[in-house]
Image (cartoon, coloured by chain):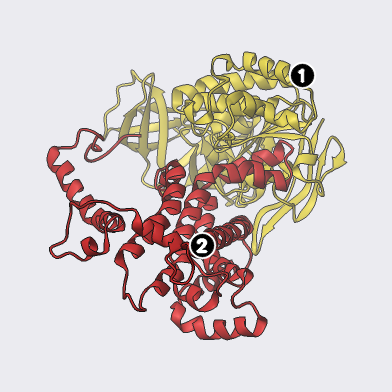
Chain colours: A red, B yellow
Amino acid sequence: MARIGSRPREIGKAGWGWTAFTSVVSLIYFFPVLWIILTAFKTRSDALAVPPKFFFTPTLQNFTNVFFRESITAQAAQATEFPLYFFNSIFIAGTSVFLALILGTLAAYGFSRYPLRGNDTYLFVILTTRMLPPIVVIIPIFLMFRLTGLAGSYWGIILLYTAFNIPFSVWLVKSFFDELNPEIEDAARMDGAGEKRVFFAMCLPQILAGLAATFVFGMILTWNEFIFALLLTGVETRTVPVAMARTMGGEIGVDYGLLAAIVTLFLIPIFVVTYILQNQLLRGVTFGTVKK
Amino acid sequence: MTIELQQLTKQFGQLTAVDAIDLEVGDGEVLCLLGPSGCGKTTTLRMIAGLEWATGGEIKLAGRVVNHLAARERNVAMSFQFYALYPSLSVAENLAYPLYAEGLSGAQIKHKVAQVARVLQLDSILNRLPGQLAEGEKQRVAVGRSIIREPNCFLFDEPLSRLDVTLREEMRGEIKEVLQGLKRATVIVTHDQLEALTMADRIAVMRAGVIEQVASPHDIFQMPENLFVAGFIGTPGMNLVSATLTDFGQNNVGTFAVEGGQTLTIAVDPAVGRLERGARVTLGIRPRNLEIVHESVADGLSSVIDMIEPMGAETLAHLNDGMHDIRVVTDWRAPLEEGDHVHVRFLPGVTHVFDAHEQAVRS
C-alpha cells in the first residue's frame, strides 16, 4: 500500500525538543501520584510542612498504621480491618468485571452476528443505563436493596457493579467482533466446526487483546467507585474507597500520611493488572484503527 | 458426485437475491458462475455450501437433498474470497484443521498435510502464521485447505480477485491444474470473464438473481442467447446497433435501416426471415469482426474515427456513425487518424440479431 503524505515519525529518532516536551507533560501527569507516594513515607509533621519537603527521612509508620492501630486498653497493637477491605475491593471489582465481561461478550456476539429486528434499539437501551448520573438512581436502588435484603451483602454490590459494567462491555466487545472477518467463521463451519467451536475456537482467540482491554477499563472504573459502595456495602463488605473516607474526621482530623499509604497500596493491584496486560491493552485500544 | 439446483430461491426480506434458478454441475465438471456484482452468484454459492438457508427450491448433492443440513454436514469444501485463514494457526495447522473433524490419526494428518504442501509448494512456509504470508501464498494455503479433505464438491468464491495481474495469471493456471486432478464437481464464482472463460467447462451467466445462459465458454462467446450475455462477455464489449428489418431475401441477406438513417445489407441467420418486416432489432457484432475500409460498401456504415487506443499488438478504434459508438479492433499497423471519414464493414456471417425482447434470433 502506498503511503501518501508525510512519512511516519520513526520511534527513537524524535528530536530532543519532542523528548523534553513529552517529559514535561508526563511529569505534570505523574506528579500527583509521585507526591502521594512520597507522602506515604513521611511523618505527620513532614507531610504538613510548609514549604513542602522533597527530602526527608522516610518512615514506614504510615503503612504500619494501615494494618495496626495503637490501643489504649490492650497491651499489643490491634489489627485493623484493612486487609478485609483490600480483599473486598479486589473480590468485588474482579468478580463483577469478570461476570460483566462474560455476559457482555455473549451479548456482543449475538448483537454482532445475528442481526435481528430492533437490535439497534436494544443496544441503545443498554447504553442509556449509563447515561443517568449515579446520584439520580441511588435512592431507588438503595430502597430496592433494603427491600430485597441485598444491602450490605457481597451479592448485592457484585450484582450492581456487574449491571453497571455490562453496557460498556457489550459495546466495546461488539466493536471487536464487528472487526473480525466473518469468512473465517464460515470457513470453520465448512471445515466441520459447530457453532460452539466457531465461537470459542475461532472468534474468542482473535479478540483476546480486546477482552483484556475491556477487563482493565472495567476494573479501573469499578475499583474507584465510591457512591454506591458507600451506601450499599456493610461493615463486612466495605471497599477501600469507603474505608478511606471513614478514616477522615475524628479527634486527629485528616491523617494525610495514612491516606497516602492506603492510596499507594490501592494503586498496586491495578498497576499489576495493567502491567501484565500491557501488550494486550495496547493492541486492544488500537484495535480497528489499523487497516487489515 | 453432482450438484443439482432446482428452482433455488433466496429472499432477503422483500429482496429476491436468487430467483428460482435451475442448474446442474456434473461429476468432475468445473462450472463458473459469472455475473456483475450483486447478481446473486455468491448467495447461490453460499446456499450450496450451507452458509445461507434457501427460502425455496432444492439443493441436491450427489443426488441427496441437503437443504436441511448444516454446512459441516454437507461435506463440501469452500475457498473464500479473503482466504479466511485462521489467524492464530500456522500454515500447517490451517491445512490440517478440516481433518480434525474427520477424526483422522496424527500420522494420517501429517501425511496429508505433507502431500498437499508438496502439490502447492508450501513446504517452506508450513510453520509461518497467515499474517506473515504474501497474497499469493495465502491464496495457495486457502486452496490447500479446501482440497485436503475428500469432499463431495468444491466451491470457490472469487478465488483470484485479490491478486495482482501477474500472480493472477500464474494462479489461474495452477488452480486449473489442481482442479483437473481432483475430478470433482466444482463451482467457481467470479466477476472476471477471463477467469471464467479459461477455467470453466461451462459458464452460467447470472443477472439480477436469474441465470441468463449456461453454456461452454466457446458457446457463451460465440452464441450468446440474449442481449445481456452478448454485452457482458468479451473485451472490448460487443457493438450493439439498433435497427429495423426492412427486407430479407436470398442467401439469408437482410437489409436493415440502422438508427441514424444509414442502410446495412448483411448475411444473417436464416431465422431472421421469420421476423416481420419492420421489426425492431438490435444488431450485435464483436469489435474483431469489423473491418475499416475507405470506400462505401453495402455491408458497412459510414463513420468518423473518434479516438484511437493502441493496445500493443492491436489497436482499438472508436468510430461514430452519428448514433452509435462502434469499437473496432484492428492490426496495429493500420494507418488510422482521429477524424478520418471511413466505412466500417461487417464481416459476413458473424452478426448476431436480437429481437425486441432482447433474445437472439437464431435457427
Amino acid type at circle 2 is: Ser
Task: Give the image location of residue A202, x and y in percent.
Answer: 62, 42
Task: Give the image location of residue B271, x and y in percent.
Answer: 68, 39
Q: Is residue B72 above or below residue A249?
A: above
The quadrant in which the N terminus of chain B is found is top right
- Chain at numbered mark 2: A
- Residue at 53% of width from left, 55% of height from top? A173
Q: Is residue B288 left or right of residue A189?
A: left
- Chain at numbered mark 1: B
Q: Is residue B106 above or below residue A121?
A: above
Q: How many marks?
A: 2
Judge by depth and name the residue closer to the eye, B349 or B169.
B169
Judge by depth and name the residue closer to the eye, B83 or B172.
B83
User: Which residue position holds label 1?
Assistant: B108
The residue furthest right is: B64
User: Does residue B226 appear in the picture of this structure?
Assistant: no
- Residue at 42% of width from left, 45% of height from top? A275
- Residue at 77% of width from left, 46% of height from top? B70
Task: Give the image location of residue A102, x and y in percent.
Answer: 61, 56
User: Mark 1 to mark 2: distance in Å?
Assistant: 53 Å
Judge by depth and name the residue closer to the eye, A240 or A279.
A240
The mark found on residue A177 in the picture is none
User: Does residue A86 appear in the picture of this structure?
Assistant: yes
User: Which residue position holds label 2?
Assistant: A89
Image quadrant of residue B127? top right
